Image (cartoon, rainbow, N blue to C red):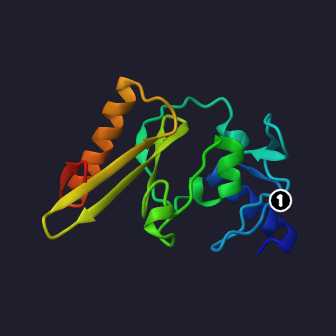
Amino acid sequence: MPPLPESLARLDERRLSSLGIARSRASRLPVEPVHVGSAGEIAGVSGEWRVDPAQLGQPFAGRAALLSPFDRLVADRKRMGELFEYDHILEMYKPAAKRRWGYYALPILYGDRLVGKLDARADRDPGLLRVFAVHRDVEFSKAMRVAVDREIKDLATWLDLEVAFGG
């Protein structure tokens, strides 16, 4: 069994490997810490960030994805805002009139950017995934629109529902 300092260093390295880039010190999320101590290398972005050296110089092929509002990429709102310049908050506890993006808006990832939010609801009785809005934080190209629409249809298929755009 490794000594405690070595165990903690290994834990920081694993955490950094799963996050890719993280602060040396950060606040604790409800489930786990998001700091990585001295693991990895200093990242070339503003602020005190560490990066997993195994990820540097690796090829990247992004895609479109609808994320859970609890996904690790967006769970740390401070990290999300600083790295991705993306604003998202789960609005299920706000009165409907005060919501900007919807009750349970799903962050939209395209390539290596967070580009919008999907406001949709599974309505099981009629068998529909009701899409109320696709909030675009950036201008969507035709390729982005097609990819996001495909992700919405894939979500509906996974839920065994039909898509109903416009609510």
| Picture quadrant of residue 63 | top left
Which quadrant: the N terminus?
Answer: bottom right
Which of the pair 139/56 is nearer the observer? 139
Does 62 appear above or below 92? above
Looking at the image, which residue is at 65% across and 50% down?
A: 80
Q: In which quarter of the image is the C terminus?
A: bottom left
Image coordinates of residue 62 in percent, x first then y, are 48, 34
- In the rendered view, does 147 fall on the left or right side of 24? left
Q: Nearer the viewer, residue 115 or 4?
A: 115
Quarter of the figure with residue 58: top right
Q: Residues within 10 Å of mark 1 (few under 14, many from 20)?
A: some
Residue 76 x, y percent position in the rendering: 65, 59
Q: Is mark 1 on a helix, strand or loop?
A: loop
Residue 115 vertical placement versus 165 (above, below) = above
- Residue furthest front as drawn: 97
Tell me which corner region of the image, top left, top right, bottom left or bottom right, holds residue 29.
Answer: bottom right
**Extreme residue toward the top, this view:** 142
**Number of marks in picture:** 1
Residue 67 image position (x, y, % from top left) = 45, 53
Amino acid residing under circle 1:
Arg
Q: For this view, does 3 lie left or right of residue 57?
A: right
Position of 106 relative to 43 (above/below): below
Residue at the image point whose x is 20% and y is 51% from the top: 164
* 98 displayed left or right of 78: left
**Could you say which is closer to the camera, residue 154 or residue 14?**
154
Query: Circle 1 sits on which residue?
Result: 25
Q: Residue at 61% x, 45% y: name it.
A: 86
- Residue at 56% x, 29% y: name it: 59
